[in-house]
Every structure is written in C-alpha cells, then in structure tokens.
Amino acid sequence: MPVNIDAVGRAYGPHEPYEVTRVKIREFADAVDARSFAHRSEEAARAEGYPDVVAPTTFAVIIAQQAEFHVVVDPEVGVDFSRVVHADERFTHHRPIIAGDLISATVHIDAIKQRGGISMVTTRTELSDEDGAPVSTVTSTLAVREEA
Amino acid sequence: MSTENGPAFDALEVGEVVAERAVELTRDSLVRYAGASGDFNPIHYNEVVAESVGLPGVIAHGMLTMGTAASVVEEWAGPGNVVDLQTRFTRPIPVPAIGEAAVSFTAKVGALDAESRTARIDITVEHDGQKVLGKAQAVVSCA
C-alpha cells in the first residue's frame, strides 16, 4: 500500500510531556561522544551560564522520534516501517534543552513527495516548554520504498 | 542563548578547520545509542534483519553519526551554542560484529554572518574514503 499523499497537513499531539532528566542527558551525551562536563555536572553547567545540566545538540531527537512514531503507526498514512530509511534531519533550537524541562511535542506532516517508487515523508515536530514557549523545531524526512 | 561562552566571532576565518575527531564505531556504540535514544530499529543490531531489507549488514544509526558530528562542533563551540544543525544521510556506515568502523569528522568555517554573529560550520564525515553525510551544516552562536 503506498503512502497516502492526502495525509499532508495532519498534526498529532501534544501528548503527555517529556520530562528531561540529568541522568538521560548524561546517558545520551555518552552515546554521542559529547564531552563537555556541562552535560554531566550542574556546577559545570552553571559555570557556562545555564541553570542546570544542558542537553547535547541532537538530544531533541528522543522527543521528536516519539512524536513521529504517531505518524508512522497511523494506518491512514500508510508508512511500512520495515521499508523506511532516514533521508534527512534538521534541528533549529530556539533555546537549549535543560534538565528539568517538561517538553511537549506536536508533529505535523509537512510534505509527501512520490517518485520512482519512493515516498519522501517530511515531518516537522515543534517542541515547547511548560509555558508554551518554543524550544526546538525538528524536521525529518523518511524515505519509504513502496512494494514492487 | 548563552553566547558569552561561545567562540570569539572576530577571530574566525572562512575555511579555517575548527575541530577534528576520529571515532571508531563498534556494535557496542550502536547498542548504547539505541538505548540512549530509544531507536530500537533492528537494522542497527541484527544482521539477519538488516540483510533482509537489502542492507550490506548492520549499519550505524544516521542519528548516531549526526549526533557525533554535533558533539565535535559543540566541543569547540561551547555547550548549547549550536543553534541549528542539518544533514542528509547519503551513505550508510556498516559496523561489523567484531572490530570497528573508522569514521573521521572535520569541521570547517563555511560562512560568517556579522549581523547575527553566527558562524556556519561545514562538517565533512568520512568512512572508508567516502562521505557519509551530505550538506552537514551547523550554525554556531558566537561571542
């Protein structure tokens, strides 16, 4: 079943907010070889001008991919996850993510382009904090190969 | 943005290499990233599944490569100072069950914007003599 191009414009969420913890920031920093102590120690983060431990640049992907999952599993969009390859990704940070943040995510299907048996599905996930202020915009494109 | 901890804008020159790193990715790196990120797609740890969808074997998460590229830039830029980061995933990095995949990262000043005091950093990521990321660019907020 091909991806349904009429799904462009759909939005999902926000669902339950994501709680950013120091432990998760450290774990993610270790995984991506992010070496600053500001990802690990509150004191080091304060010395850099932050109120608490600061997340590495791509930490937002954890929250964004949870939101994007709602698109992938929507039967009316029709993405076969076993045929998906990640094509591109972009983060635009309105401010850094800090331990203690409660982040809400809303994902929008911005575009679906089909050519040569491949559907390129572009989503935009808007992350905001408890006060509703924007934190990050995460844009992601999945390439979905259609069955021959 | 906490730009006071950022690189000094006036000292930067277009073309200058600001950071480099050589990384050896292993299956351990992939499992660690899967757990940290929540991306448990089996193509990143299971040979049989990877080959069944036409891949050369288990491959690294594109986001692990991008995340490591970000870390290389962020170590130079100061934490929290990479305000924008984008890439295309152009070539997978196969990671063997035993041994490692060598990946090199080079970050260079691509453009300078005096008005916003930001630097565009172009990142070249290579494995096996070939580029694995396309248009990998970071925007860094400078002091």
Image (spheres, rainbow, N blue to C red):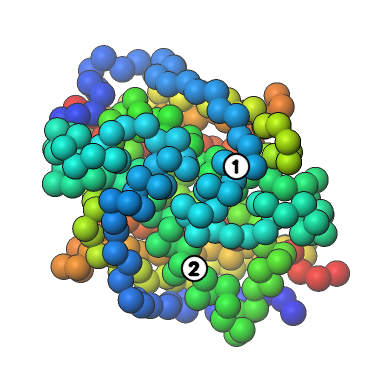
Q: What element carries label 1?
A: helix
Q: Is mark 2 on a helix, strand or loop?
A: helix
Where is residue B95 shown, x and y percent of the image? 70, 39
**Chain under callout 1:** B
In the picture, the quarter occupied by the C terminus of chain B is top left
User: What residue do we see at 72% from left, 65% from top?
Assistant: A83
User: What residue do we see at 31% from left, 46% from top?
Assistant: A55
Q: How far apart are marks 1 and 2 (CA)?
A: 26 Å
Which amino acid does the dot numbered 1 rest on? Asp
Classify mark 1: residues with Cα within 10 Å, few (<14), some (14-19) or many (20+).
some
Q: What residue is shown with label 1?
A: B28
Which amino acid does the dot numbered 2 rest on? Glu
Q: Residue A68 carries which label?
A: 2
Where is residue A90 shown, x and y percent of the image? 45, 50
Which residue sits furthest bottom? Answer: A76
Q: Quadrant of residue A111?
A: bottom right
Q: Residue A37 carries which label?
A: none
Q: Choose between A68 and A32: the one closer to the eye.
A: A32
